[in-house]
Image (cartoon, coloured by chain):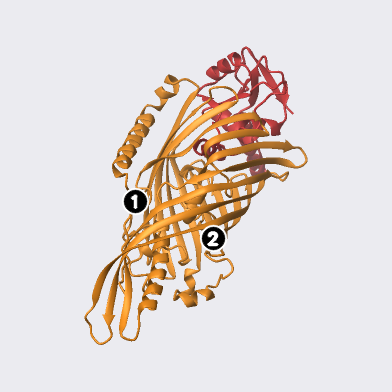
């Protein structure tokens, strides 16, 4: 019985550690963007280059991170794709002339700065990062 | 008759070819080395990308898809460089230069793979003008993009290299767009019209076609001119294509991302016309039946041409569940000139093991006459029945060594020889048994991309 309890405790610790490690992702947008929330489906279509206009017909400028936990969590949980499939999707578009992937940044600070200064821009950051001069979008 | 039908690949622009190819390779190398500084140096509105790949073929029994593959052949590479520009928020322009080598084909001549101006008025309606890739099945857009898939060779039943010239890109206009309906899912479409430009009328496929055509014609002449006192043979000496024109082509594709998550189905079709002219020199050999002394005459040129309407239809389905992708496609290609329909189908499973490794397998069946799958109609031509089909089981592995470098290896277990070119297998025009029924193909390839 004691062994079983130990196993359960270890499992709980492992699960809680995993939970802590899973990056929380926050969607951000330029303050002038008319939308405050997005459907998951719309978010996916924006990052696949299929949905290109906000509701007021302003051009959507999606941006992303080069890599890292936040990027992986965003692609997997919000776009419902593996990172490999997301990369392949844009390689296909790029080399067949059908589209250009979203601009990417190596760190969140640069990404936030770009979103804050670019009309229609949106992106994502880690929940631990403080967004400055941008608005937060909720996901429906 | 002569056991070898000689042929000659005409280039005509070898200096420009090699020079431009070197220039493209050099530019690509520079861009790979300096991509970081370029990205910042050219600003946000000019975007460069490229790739370079090198492959290797080794086959048993038959040379395929290139000459001398039974001894191993590394004439298999691609180099591409593209640039996109976004001058306004609705307009995109771009161009991709590509050089490839596949045995006698391509020979690293640089050509414009695609080049267009794209005006996207709304998500549901955009226009492209220029040289534009067009839809044919699920993967024609990414046909030359090695990093877009796990296997090296696309299934030949739907993406046979024989059709490459018909399916690459057309010069004209296309309309495209997408719409999302909450209950029905998402629809993407593209419709196009224009003409096709065949860069080289002397690729292996076309030379094989001319040779087979001339062989049949000359055999007929020989039989006609022979009599009880003299046997006459006409022997082909040199064959080359003069021109191939495809004055018009049109078609379209509809892609439906169904409400079932991960399930995509599509239908694509196109039709067009081609006009071919080729010429071949030949000699006349007359042998009196009462002596062994032959009389050979240089007989001049046989100039031949034909034209045909053609149409292709492809139906596809792809299901993705996390790391697993299952796909299947059926395609048919009809040519009016010989009232023949070629085509086939395949099923494919791909699994992404982790960030670096993926594995894929497919089974493909191709027929060069969909209404004579068992090859029974080939008896009259003297060919074995297995020249009618090509059935392949392919197993592939891919390793992404880094984010910009990958390596692939695959093996094909093949039954049939419908796609084996007789010009690649010496003596096979006279003795089809030279080409074997059961054989294997090993392919390796590495690609750098940025």
Among the 4 quarters of the image, the one containing residue A10: top right
> Chain A in the picture: what colour?
red
Tell me which residue sits at (32%, 80%) in the image. B231
Disc 2: which residue: B364
Q: Chain of mark 1?
A: B
Q: Which chain does orange denote in the image?
A: B
Residue B450 appears anywhere in the view = no
Measured as percent of width and height from the top left, residue B9 is found at 33, 54
Measured as percent of width and height from the top left, residue B21 is found at 34, 39
Tell me which residue sits at (45%, 36%) in the image. B96
Q: Share a chain, discs 2 and 1?
A: yes
Tell me which residue sits at (41%, 42%) in the image. B447
Would you say B191 lies left or right of B392 here? right
Residue depth check, mark 2 versus mark 1: number of the one nearer the observer = 1
Q: How many marks?
A: 2
Q: Which mark is residue A110?
A: none
């Amino acid at each position: 019985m004691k062994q079983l309890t130990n196993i359960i405790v270890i499992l709980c610790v492992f699960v809680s550690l995993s939970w802590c490690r899973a990056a929380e992702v926050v969607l951000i947008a330029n303050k002038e963007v008319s939308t405050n929330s997005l459907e998951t489906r719309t978010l996916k279509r924006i990052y696949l280059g299929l949905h290109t206009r906000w509701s007021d017909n302003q051009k959507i400028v999606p941006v992303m991170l080069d890599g890292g936990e936040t990027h992986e969590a965003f692609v997997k949980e919000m776009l419902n794709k593996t990172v490999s499939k997301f990369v392949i999707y844009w390689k296909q578009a790029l080399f067949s002339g059908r589209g250009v992937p979203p601009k990417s940044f190596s760190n969140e600070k640069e990404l936030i700065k770009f979103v804050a200064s670019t009309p229609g821009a949106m992106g994502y950051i880690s929940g631990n990062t403080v967004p400055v001069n941008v608005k937060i979008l909720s996901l429906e | 008759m002569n056991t070898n039908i000689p042929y000659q690949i005409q280039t005509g622009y070898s200096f420009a070819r090699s020079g431009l190819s070197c220039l493209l390779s050099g530019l690509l190398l520079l861009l790979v080395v300096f991509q970081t500084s370029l990205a910042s140096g050219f600003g946000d509105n000019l975007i460069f990308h490229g790739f370079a790949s090198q492959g290797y073929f080794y086959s048993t029994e038959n040379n395929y898809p290139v000459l001398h593959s039974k001894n191993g052949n590394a004439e298999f590479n691609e180099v591409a460089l593209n640039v996109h520009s976004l001058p306004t928020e609705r307009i995109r322009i771009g161009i991709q230069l590509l050089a490839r080598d596949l045995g006698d084909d391509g020979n690293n001549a640089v050509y414009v793979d695609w080049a267009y101006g794209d005006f996207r008025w709304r998500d549901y309606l955009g226009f492209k003008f220029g040289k534009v890739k067009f839809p044919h099945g699920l993967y024609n857009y990414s046909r030359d993009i090695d990093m877009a898939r796990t296997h090296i060779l696309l299934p030949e039943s739907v993406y046979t290299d024989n059709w490459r010239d018909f399916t690459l890109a057309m010069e004209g206009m296309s309309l495209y767009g997408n719409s999302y309906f909450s209950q029905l899912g998402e629809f993407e479409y593209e419709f196009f019209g224009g003409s096709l430009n065949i860069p080289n009328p002397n690729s292996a496929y076309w030379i094989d076609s001319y040779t087979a055509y001339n062989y049949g014609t000359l055999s007929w002449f020989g039989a006609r001119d022979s009599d009880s006192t003299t046997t006459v043979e006409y022997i082909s000496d040199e064959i080359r294509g003069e021109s191939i024109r495809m004055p018009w082509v049109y078609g379209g594709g509809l892609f439906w991302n169904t409400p079932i998550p991960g399930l995509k189905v599509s239908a694509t079709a196109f039709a067009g016309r081609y006009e071919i002219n080729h010429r071949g020199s030949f000699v006349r050999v007359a042998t009196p039946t009462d002596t062994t002394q032959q009389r050979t005459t240089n007989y001049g040129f046989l100039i031949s041409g034909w034209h045909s309407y053609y149409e292709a239809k492809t139906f596809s389905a792809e299901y993705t569940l996390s790391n697993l992708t299952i796909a299947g496609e059926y395609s048919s290609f009809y040519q009016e000139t010989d009232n023949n329909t070629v085509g086939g189908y395949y099923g494919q499973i791909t699994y992404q093991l982790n960030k670096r490794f993926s594995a894929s397998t497919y089974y493909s069946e191709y027929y060069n006459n969909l209404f004579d799958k068992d090859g029974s109609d080939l008896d009259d031509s003297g060919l074995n029945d297995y020249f009618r089909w090509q059935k392949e089981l392919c197993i592939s592995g891919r390793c992404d060594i880094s984010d910009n470098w990958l390596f692939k290896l695959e093996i094909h277990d093949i039954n049939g020889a419908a796609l084996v070119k007789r010009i690649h297998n010496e003596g096979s025009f006279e003795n089809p048994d030279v080409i074997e029924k059961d054989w294997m193909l090993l392919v390796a390839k590495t690609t750098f991309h940025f």
